[in-house]
Image (cartoon, rainbow, N blue to C red):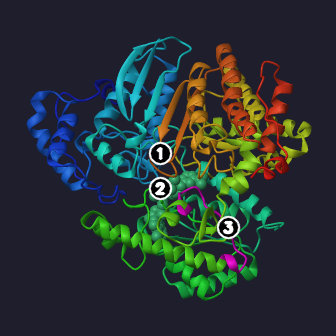
């Protein structure tokens, strides 16, 4: 432990470490686009070398130019530390501030080899969700966190630690911004260019904000989504129902496990054999098939026996959909979770081309690759349309599937109201429009999470029990509108230990509204104070929440007053959380649906058992949820109007502007 602490405090080593050989057993990021001109490449090198003593520049300049040539980015592999990166017990991190040590715990989890998608390239999930752009940034950040006191704030610009600035005890210890661009420079290729220059990064959601807790978060969200999707189709249970989707990656890999927890039969296609093997070896997917005929036979048996089982198809999702359509198999629920937020750089693989050849084409012939992706999307949608005509409920799962399919010219639009040509409305809902929005977010229910920084599973068990007690108590007095949400989450938390959901840090997720989040947090803070829990607990949430994200095709897709294209809510949330007591806050461009398509933010809050913390958590969590409910209510969402009126009754200092609803006939008579 002493040696580890010494290395952290040293930051960027003065003596050059030996060059690293890349381990081929690790999943590496695809080669990024060669987008810089030679002048820009010089600038990228100059930028990278800023981190190092000039005496090393000759060696490093050559090495970094090779990295840029071979990988499209400068990761500074040589500086990846040799110690194992994982969420260590909080006291193992050298620190002067407990809050900063808790942040090191969280940050390390995002780079853990068992957690991160491309750990050597500092990518946590989503193909491009970066914690840092390079290893120098990691080393410097850890050093700053180890040195800082509670009277300083670390400022982070897209992975780059700008430095420690004087602040005060109640201020956030870290303020993170990722990918904040001047709006006109926020296209996909702008990310490629400015990321290659080393001046910005794609933080996804919880990657760049140190809040990723492995696939558990998405298992929970997907379980809730599938249960509610089943309810929409009128099914009483998902037994014997077939759910088809794609992706066994960072987030998408949760689909098979969630479907089994929800009681369904799941078939998930994945083109990358490494991703399939990982999920299979972790027990997240039960069986793997390479042959479509064998798979079809297995589906028939599982349907017949109403088995809750997950089957992976190792191949292209389009081949699977076309086979299901040709065989006229009844699919009940359908979706997609390829990384279409990143369609031209490895997020979506074209059909009819091997995985390896596609990767080559992506860098050697990007224009052809683009064409193949577009043609594949057209076929993808054609097969889905056939199955939907046969009763399948298909929903967009927040990966920009409908957006990119529409852009590619696929048949995803409803006819225009005038009857001429296609309109602007998609044929299929996003999961937020039908499910998450009206059933969860508008009532304030969202993915609340916590992490036990002791790294001790016993503490997690204690927190599970506390949370169950709190929710059961709330259920008794809850209005009928939110009883279903509460009971789904009580069931979830009771089964959480059995379902062995922890990968990486000792973390738990559940959906709760403002009242539930505050009550649970208060109970945890008390338990830390009384030592029932042995070390501070970190609270946080996914950015994908009630108030954290403005994203017109996902989180705010059930906002219909035109304001879904604004980002005031997410920006206000970030600022409001910061001055109400968050330990760290983050604001991101990109995440989920793509660079330039979404603004989102999150927070982390360390519960250290103090009275000050009790005040902070009440103030901050109340705002963090009710900001979004107030906005959703102003957008005339009836569930949110109900929820904000209830919140105003409970908190007299809350006074929100409510909308007046106009009779449609008055407007109809004018136009
Ligand atoms: N709905 C949500 O709550 C939610 C949450 C997180 C992520 N997402 C979105 O879902 C997408 C997936 O996220 P992820 O973290 O799993 O990304 P990922 O890149 O780790 O996984 C996507 C997987 O899809 C596979 N794939 C790509 N094209 C394919 C094809 N044609 N056929 C079969 N497999 C193919 C890839 O090999 C990869 O393993 C992202 O766009 C992400 O933003 C949605």
Q: Is mark 1 within 8 Å of ligand 1?
A: no
Mark 2 and 1 residues: CB-CB less than 8 Å, in contact?
A: yes
Is label 2's Cβ within 8 Å of ligand 1? yes
Disc assigned to residue 590: 1
Numbered label attached to residue 418: 3
Looking at the image, is 308 positioned above or below residue 147? below
Query: Upstream in the sequence, badge 3 or badge 1?
Result: 3
How many angstroms separate mark 2 from mark 1 (CA)?
9 Å
| Count of number-bearing discs | 3
N-term-proximal mark, 2 vs 3: 2
Q: Position of residue 511 (x, y in %)?
A: 71, 43
Q: Secondary structure at mark 1?
A: loop
Label 3 close to label 1 by CB (< 8 Å)? no
Asked whether the viewer can see residue 262, the reply is yes
Q: Residue at horizontal 73%, vertical 73%?
A: 241
Which residues, given as a range, are shown in magenta?
A: 388-402
Q: CA distance from mark 3 to mark 1?
A: 35 Å
Viewer-proximal residue among 622 and 1: 622
Image point 61% across, 34% down: which residue? 569
Relative to 221, residue 582 above or below: above
Q: Residues within 10 Å of mark 2 (few under 14, many from 20)?
A: many
| Label 3 element class | loop
Q: Where's the N terminus, which quadrant?
A: top left
The reply, left or right, for residue 622 in relation to residue 231 is left
Magenta stretch holds residue 633: no
Mark 2 and mark 3: Cα distance apart in space: 31 Å
Q: What residue sits right under mark 2 in the picture?
A: 341
Query: Going 58% across and 42% down the picture, which residue do you hit?
Result: 550
**Residue 14 location in percent, x, y?**
19, 27
């Amino acid at each position: 432990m002493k040696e580890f602490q010494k290395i952290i405090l040293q930051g960027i080593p003065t003596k050059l470490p030996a060059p690293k050989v890349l381990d081929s057993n690790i999943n590496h990021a695809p080669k990024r686009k060669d987008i810089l001109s030679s002048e820009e490449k010089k600038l990228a090198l100059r930028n990278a070398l800023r981190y190092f003593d000039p005496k090393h520049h000759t060696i490093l300049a050559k090495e970094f130019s090779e990295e840029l040539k071979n990988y499209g980015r400068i990761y500074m592999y040589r500086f990846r530390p040799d110690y194992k990166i994982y969420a260590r017990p909080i006291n193992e991190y050298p620190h002067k501030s407990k809050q900063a040590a808790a942040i090191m715990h969280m940050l390390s989890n995002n780079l853990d080899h068992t957690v991160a998608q491309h750990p050597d390239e500092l990518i946590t999930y989503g193909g491009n969700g970066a914690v840092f752009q390079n290893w120098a940034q990691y080393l410097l950040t850890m050093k700053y966190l180890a040195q800082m006191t509670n009277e300083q704030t670390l400022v982070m610009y897209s992975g780059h630690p700008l430095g420690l600035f004087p602040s005060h005890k109640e201020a956030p210890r870290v303020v993170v911004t990722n990918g904040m661009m001047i709006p006109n420079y926020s296209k996909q290729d702008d990310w490629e260019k400015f990321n290659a220059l080393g001046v910005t990064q794609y933080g996804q959601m919880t990657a760049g904000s140190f809040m990723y807790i492995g696939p558990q978060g998405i298992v929970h969200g997907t379980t809730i989504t599938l249960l509610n999707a089943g309810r929409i189709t009128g099914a009483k249970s998902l037994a014997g129902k077939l759910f088809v989707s794609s992706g066994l990656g960072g987030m998408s890999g949760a689909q098979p496990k969630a479907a089994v927890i929800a009681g369904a039969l799941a078939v998930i296609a994945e083109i990358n054999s490494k991703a399939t093997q990982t999920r299979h070896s972790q027990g997240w997917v039960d069986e793997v098939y390479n042959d479509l005929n064998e798979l079809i036979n297995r589906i028939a048996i599982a349907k017949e026996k109403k088995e809750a089982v997950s089957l992976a198809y190792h191949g292209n999702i389009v081949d699977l959909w076309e086979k299901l359509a040709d065989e006229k198999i009844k699919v009940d629920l359908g979706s997609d979770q390829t990384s279409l937020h990143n369609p031209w750089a490895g997020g979506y693989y074209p059909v009819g081309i091997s995985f390896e050849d596609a990767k080559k084409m992506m860098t050697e012939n990007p224009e052809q690759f683009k064409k193949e992706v577009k043609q594949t999307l057209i076929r993808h949608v054609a097969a889905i349309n056939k199955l939907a005509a046969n009763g399948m409920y298909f929903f967009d799962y927040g990966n920009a599937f409908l957006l990119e399919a529409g852009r590619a010219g696929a048949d995803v639009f409803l006819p225009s109201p005038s009857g001429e040509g296609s309109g602007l409305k998609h044929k299929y809902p996003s999961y937020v429009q039908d499910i998450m929005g009206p059933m969860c977010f508008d009532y304030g229910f969202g993915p609340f999470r916590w992490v036990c920084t002791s790294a001790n599973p016993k503490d997690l068990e204690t927190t599970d029990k506390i949370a169950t007690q709190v929710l059961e108590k709330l259920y008794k007095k809850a209005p009928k509108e939110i009883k279903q949400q509460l009971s789904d989450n009580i069931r979830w938390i009771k089964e959480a230990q059995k379902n062995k959901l922890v990968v990486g840090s000792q973390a738990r997720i559940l959906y709760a509204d403002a009242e539930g989040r505050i009550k649970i947090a208060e109970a945890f803070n008390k338990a830390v104070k009384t030592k029932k829990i042995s070390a501070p607990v970190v609270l946080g949430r996914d950015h994908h929440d009630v108030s954290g994200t403005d994203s017109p095709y996902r989180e705010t897709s059930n906002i219909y007053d035109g304001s879904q294209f604004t980002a005031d809510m997410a920006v206000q949330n970030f600022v409001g959380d910061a001055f109400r007591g968050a330990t760290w806050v983050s604001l991101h461009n990109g995440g989920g649906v793509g660079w330039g398509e979404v603004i989102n933010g999150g927070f982390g809050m360390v519960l250290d058992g103090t009275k000050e913390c009790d005040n902070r958590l009440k103030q901050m969590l109340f705002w963090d949820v009710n900001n979004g409910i107030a906005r959703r209510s102003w957008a005339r969402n009836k569930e949110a109007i109900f929820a904000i009126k209830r919140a105003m009754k409970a908190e007299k200092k809350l006074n929100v502007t409510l909308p007046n609803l106009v009779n449609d006939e008055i407007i109809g008579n004018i136009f």
